[in-house]
Each structure stands twice: as structure tokens, then as C-alpha cells.
Image (tube, rainbow, N blue to C red):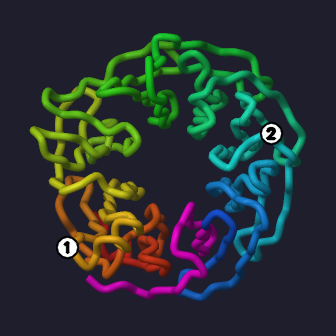
Amino acid sequence: MDIAFSVPLPFRKVKSLVASNNRVLVSDSNQMVAITAEGQMVWHLKFERPIGKMVVAPSGDIVGICDGGKQLTVRSPDTGELKLSIPVNSCVYAIPAVTKSHLICHGWDNQLNVFSQTGELCWSAPTDKNAIWMQPVVVEDWVFTSSQGVIAYALDDGSKLGLWSELSPSEGFLTIRRADAKRIVVGYGINQLFLLNKDHRTVCPWILPSGYRIFMDSLMVSESLDRELTLIATAGVDGKKAVVSVTESGKVLWQYPISKIPVAISVGTAGQVYIAQSPTLDEWDKYKDFCEFSCFVLGLSATGEELWKWEAPAPITSGLAVADNGVYGVCDGNLVCISSVEEYPG
């Protein structure tokens, strides 16, 4: 499996990797670069204070936390130009959420802050310690976060719409993912997985097959070829590990064996699954002369069949960004375009 191109980056460790408007944006804690789909670096920004993870707005703009957690910023992916800066009482761990009308982020002071697209504070509401580590989840005109369980607010005015206190971990943190236009998936602990329906205000357990232990931080939600809601996640199965696809009724559609927990899992628009497995940079630097490490990216079809495998020469140090023209990752300080998505439609 060949790569389309490789572009050296001005840093090895990666905090964020996203694709927008024919650009791939990569950042570490103090720098941000943009690279075209042809492999040309078009801008490079440096920051005196730490920056957080980036997300892509519906407009294509890049939204993130900057200035050591004190500014929520909006930038053009084409030029890097700062279009909006909003003072926040946040931190660099917070991951914003963005809709066509609002910018949303958690604050270090346990507040959910909702801003207009022009930067005015629309409303704020209390959260708990879980929230600072999670991205707020928006479903239609509801925004979900954590406050003594799962809580929902009206996106427009901040009115409280519901509190599901039974969805509160005794230890650890909640994982919340958008499932579809009406539902979210909530996970915590060991195999504590639920499906919350906003319209019916019901909570149903997501049935998991016996003997499977789901790693919640790897959780993705997709649809099967039959349009059935499925989760894609790393799981422990009979003492071994696998990436699995499980329906909400508990049926295992497929599983792909792996040797260790992936550094990244991404799902394409047609249901393809992309998996990156690699040691950390520290493991690589310390033990590469004494151990044999496996570094690769896999492309699986929507039915779990292996389509291709790229053997990386060094650690994969980022998530995976799926764009129209390819699958992107960072391999030891180099942005690589790993494959053509259209060539492997799944």
C-alpha cells in the first residue's frame, strides 16, 4: 500500500488533526499548520501560549481554544486569518462544539457556555467535573452535557429540558456520542452503555454480547448497510482485543482482531472503518532498538473486510482525518495522505 504524499511538519507530537475546505489542519500545543490536498503547506502559525484541539464548523471555519485556555477562536482554513476571538473561562482540555448558529464550550469553572456566531454570550449553565473532558453533544435544538448525570438544555435559551441522574458513573467519566437526529449514546464504566431518546425521554440499555468488554473512549456510532444503528469500538473478547461492530440489539456484525488498543478509529461516510495501531513516541524512542513494534493503518469495509493495510515506518502520532481525496494521519512528524477514499469505497 503506497501513500499519495508525505509532508514534514514542524513538530512530532500532534494534538489535533482535522480536514476542511480542501485543507488539512494539524496542530501541537503551540503551532498550527494548513496543508492542501496536493501536499503543499500554505500557512503556519505559532502561539506563545498553549492551544487546544480544533473542530470544524459547518461553514468550514476552524474553531478551537487558544491563549492557554482563555480564548475561543474562529479561523479561516484557507488563510489562518483570525475571524473571531471570544474571551472564555475555559482550559486547553475543552473541546468546543459548533452549529450553524452557536459556539459551545465547557469552562474550567464547571459552566457550559453558549455563544452566538458573532461572539455574544447567549447563556451559561452549570456542569460537573466530567464535562471539562468531553465535547458537548448537540441533537437538533438540544445540547447535552454532564451535571450529576446527563443533562439537556435548549440550545436557544438555556432552559433545562431534562436530567437523567441514573446515567451517572460512580467513578471515571461519561462518554456521550450523537447517534442520530433523535438519540445519543451514553457510556461509562465497564459495559455501561445506554441509548437516550430525546423525543420520548427514554433511556434503554444498549445490549452488549456476553464476554465483550467495550472500551468507551474508542466509541464511534455508525449505521450498518441495513441502516441499523451500530457502535464501532475496541473491545476485549475472550482475553484478546478486537475492533467490533455491534447493533443496539446486541448482534455482532463483525470483529477484526488487533494486538493492542488502536491509537485512532475513524468511520467514513459510507461506513468504512479506518484503524491506526502504533506504539507511543516515548515507547518508540526508548525501545525501538530492542523491540519489534507494529505501526500501521487499516482500511476496512462497512462489513469488516480488510481492504488495505499501510505499514508505517514509524509511530502514528495522531488521529485519522477522512477527506474526499484521502485518509490522513501523522507518522513521526510527517503528514501522510494514506489512501484514496474513492479507490476503496467499501
Q: Amino acid at mark 2?
A: Asn
Q: Quadrant of the C terminus?
A: bottom left
Q: CA distance from mark 1 to mark 2?
A: 45 Å
Q: Secondary structure at mark 1?
A: loop
The residue that appears at 57% across and 61% down in the rendered structure is 16
Q: Which quadrant would residue 116 be assigned to in this image?
A: top right
Left/right placement of residue 147 relative to residue 164 reads right
Query: Is 18 situated above or below 254?
Result: below
- Tag shown at residue 292: 1
Can you give x and y, in whole percent of width and height, for residue 153 in the image?
A: 68, 22
Can you give x and y, in whole percent of width and height, for residue 319 in the image?
A: 45, 61
> Which residue lies under the disc numbered 2?
89
Query: Is 56 situated above or below 333?
Result: above
Query: Is 280 situated above or below 326?
Result: above
Which residue is situated farthest in the left direction here?
238
For residue 21: magenta?
yes
Q: Amino acid at mark 1?
A: Glu
- Magenta part of the chain: 1-27
Q: Residues within 10 Å of mark 2 (few under 14, many from 20)?
A: some
Left/right placement of residue 59 relative to residue 201 reads right
Along the line of sight, the residue nearer the viewer: 253 or 120: 120
Left/right placement of residue 293 relative to residue 5 reads left
The residue that appears at 46% across and 76% down in the rendered structure is 325
Q: Tag 2 or tag 1, which sits nearer the N-term? A: 2
